Amino acid sequence: MTGGDSVSVMHRRSEADVYKSDLGKSHRTSSGSTFYNMVTDGKNNGTRNKVKKGDKMMRRLSSSFTAGQGHNFRNNVFSARVDVDMKHFVLPKTQKCDETSEFISKVLGENFLFSSLSQSDIKMFIDAMAPMQAGQDDFIISQGDNGDYFYILEEGEVGFYINGKAVGAGGRGKSFGELALLHDCPRTASVKALTPCKLWKIEQTTFRFIMVHSTERSDKTVIEVLRKVPLFSNLDEGFFNKLANSMTCKTFTDGEIVIRKGDIGDTFYVVREGKVAVTEVGRRLSMRHVSVGSQVVLGVGQSFGERALLTGEVRSATIIAAGNCDLLCLDRKDFEEILGNLKDLLELARWRHILTRVPLFSNALIDSAEKDAIESLNSEILGKLTIAMTKEEVSAGEVIMKKGDVGDKFYIIRDGHVELSCGGENSGPQELDLELGAGDFFGEHSLFTGEPRHFTVVSRTDCVLSCLTRDSCEKLLAPLQKVLERARWRRVLLGIPQVAEKKLEQREMDLLVLQVTTQGFRRGETLSEQDEDISKRSVYILNHGKVSIKRDGAAYTFSPGAYFGDSALAEDKSVMCNGEVITFLQDSVCGVLSAVELQAVLSKFTIVGSTALRKASIKKYTDIKIADFQRHQLLGRGSFGKVWLVSREGDNELCALKVMIKSRIYRKRQSHFVINERKVMAALEHPFIIKLVSAFQDDFSLYMLLSLVEGGEMYELMKRQESRRLGNDAVCFYSACMIDALGYIHSHNICHRDIKAENIMLDRDGYSLIIDFGFAKVVENKTFTLCGTPYYLAPEMLLSKGYNKGADYWAFAVLMYEMLVGNVPFSAGDEMSVYRLICSLRYTIPEDIVKPEAADLLEKIFVKPKKRLGCLVGGVKDITEHPFFDSINWDDLLARKAKPPFEGEAIVANEQPDSIKHIMYQPEDANKLALEPEVNALFSEFGPQVKAVIAKPKPPPQSKLSFRKEIANGAQKNGYVPAKQADGCGCACVIS
């Protein structure tokens, strides 16, 4: 039995957890389900111990689970962000004798939370720990108080109590309260001094500062060293981040041989702490400053052995530890598994570097008004262009391309020389213009135009070329060109006086740009802008080509980047109908914006959706008023507000409207999380991700209008099975939906950070959707905030050393295991014990339940992040191409042509709530909910302002309920028993 937090039987939801649900405490239906992002309140949840084997065990677990006995670690936990200014934060420091320091070091070494720390980090912890004295019968920790310190007992004896009952005791060397270092939560036990005690303590802020500072400092040091390795000079930022994260630390004692001269090398080293001595130096040693026969000492930040990653050549020197030292290591096998073949990487880096020198590429990649947003896309596309290049060999004297021919290839010379001339096939030597060699390129214009070649290229020697075709280039550049095109449209629109004077916010400009469509015009084609009907008029932005405009007897010529047709915006009809005639002088392409849509935005009649939403959805909700919504049923409630089943006047489509009270969000200091969730959801659109239809606000509340997901939670689906598990085939299907969506989310550099059964919903057709983006975050390299659900947390999250998308893949595997087995893989009686199991990777896969392919996939994800499937060189493809998914046709799945395991289930149905007569605002509520202008300004980025009204809910029309009865019938046919049907609506709905 451990003390303090380690004897917890349950824990309070943190304030962030309240936000996480967005609506805090759960409103449950008769079945105990949670609706629309409601966090469970602990009812009907029970022990979820590790499954070992067989149905008998499963039935026993199922019984205890249903009875609601045991522990509940399915609620969210969250630690506050580290807001400590690294430059100004001063670590507390208390002098200690060597004996005390050694004692504390030993205790810390036995605690898994400190297992990844270096010697210098341990010393920082020891120095930062403050002394504390406790008299006999003093309470060191009181049950229910907010935890803030972790304690080590040096002298005396303490007792542990839960609800006043003694549950254990501890003496010298006992540590307790470590849960307070991970996240904010109340103490779940009391700790009393049974004798006078001497303790050492450290609080959460200092702990997290040391962990974050240590990791960032270490990564920065390693990356700086890696950049200085000549072999890596042309590699990109992503390579260095991944390489630094992939290296493991190994400790060598004084005099221990690290590498021996003459041995075959396969490992690269960086000195993390201490020193190494280089002896028996041979002539092939890569360190230029070392002379033959000399001995040098390499210190912190220096590296050696990098050529072992490239070749299997013998070591050129012997290197031994000069005192105890820590070295970061990476062997060739791991390097190639995580990052790929170094020779190929260097080759790709070379071609990538050359591509940045091609004017047509470099101009396209940097000439953007949205430079920050496009930088990662540039890098990704450059990498894809490089990979798309194919190898081509030509013999000396061979014509590679001929003047006058229409080409479709771009070439980079890998080896050899070519002659470039402007003459034709029979041109003489005097017409030779240029000789090109390795690293030079030609033919780039063929990638963007169908113009004839301007010169002839003949190989002077045998040559090896890298080629890129026009088709490949167009496919790969399409996303970039679309972003660049929209950026150009944005710049041009902001130059229109009628637009500029409105000072539109970014989200309004996003909506405006999204309405622009592309249209081609033939040479000689004309347009006449004489119609008074604004619905028939448009504003044009010239992308390519040339136009002439005759206006009031004068002619004007416009080139790409110009706009015309803006007279449609004039209020004076005489100006609007000025008789201008537009003639296209060349084949041209224009961006076209309807004057009606432009006027709608300028008149601020719109409701912001997102640049990722379909135009149909945006147009459908461009003039939202709260009074337009009929609220049929209350789906959920919590500390932040309510979720309603709604429809719009004259519209048969049901949606979910999440209403969050601003004042409550402000008091919980969660405004930035709510806004971040809206932004993340606005950036995503995928068949297996819940859709944000719109977001808006009034003086009192924030509103999120989301698509309705009728099928219920994955968690509820599992609970309804006798064995609490799904079949291998069903798990394969649902996992395929999830991993496809996760790969899409990660392609936007977004981590979800709370994948779990409660956050996976089944839609009406039986497909699984990811919901709840309250913890989602853009992560370029690493983030440190602990958040999520205890059972699903990855080891790297718990160890506070930084994490990224690998944490989502870990949670995905936990959920996959849970669906297969009926229980989570890491389960124990208290939260810290769960975390110990996770960090020690201790779990069991029942062979009689789980297929070998599924077990293999789980085993390859339940590993350290550097070896985890999804985090290796193949990315998410390593998961989607795993044999477990051999039965999945990914194209059919994405097109929703695949047959789900169960169709049309109503997994849960909710009761008609007593508060159905609730109105949005009572007159007396206005004063309570009103905010000061400066506080309201905190929510300005959430969405546009609409007018608050009082509106009573109305029962839904019968036509909107019929399909839900069909769903329920379908569920019963498939062996499911839906929960009690409500009067009116029997759907199960969840919102993220």
Image (cartoon, grey):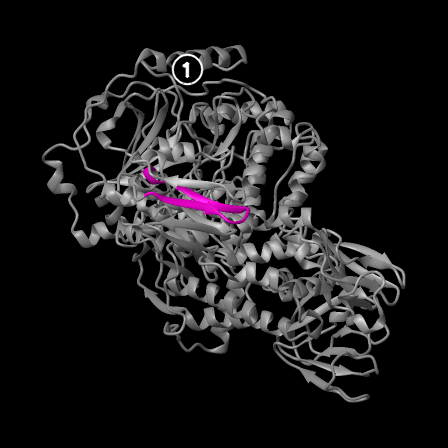
Residue 33, compared with residue 82, is above or below; it is: above
- Please tell me whether residue 580 belongs to the stretch shown in magenta: yes
- How packed is label 1: few (under 14 Cα within 10 Å), some, or many (20 or more)? many
Relative depth, front residue between 158 and 406: 406
Question: Which residue corresponds to the image point at 55% horizontal and 51% vertical from the top-left?
Answer: 480
Name, please, the residue furthest toward the front. 553
Residue 303, compared with residue 376, is above or below; it is: below
Where's residue 911, x and y in %?
32, 18
Residue 592 shown left or right of residue 196 in the figure: right
Residue type indicated by callout 1: Arg
Q: Majority secondary structure of the magenta segment?
A: strand
Residue 827, compared with residue 145, is above or below; it is: above
Where's residue 81, x and y in %?
38, 57
Where's residue 538, x and y in %?
37, 41
Residue 963 visible to an observer of this rendering? yes
Residue 79 shown left or right of residue 277 in the figure: left
Where's residue 589, x and y in %?
51, 46
- Please tell me whether residue 207 belongs to the stretch shown in magenta: no
Q: Which residue is mark 1?
A: 964
Please provide the residue range marked out in magenta: 579-596
Question: Which residue corresponds to the image point at 59% horizontal and 21% vertical from the top-left?
Answer: 901
For the C terminus, the quadrant is top left
Element carrying mark 1: helix
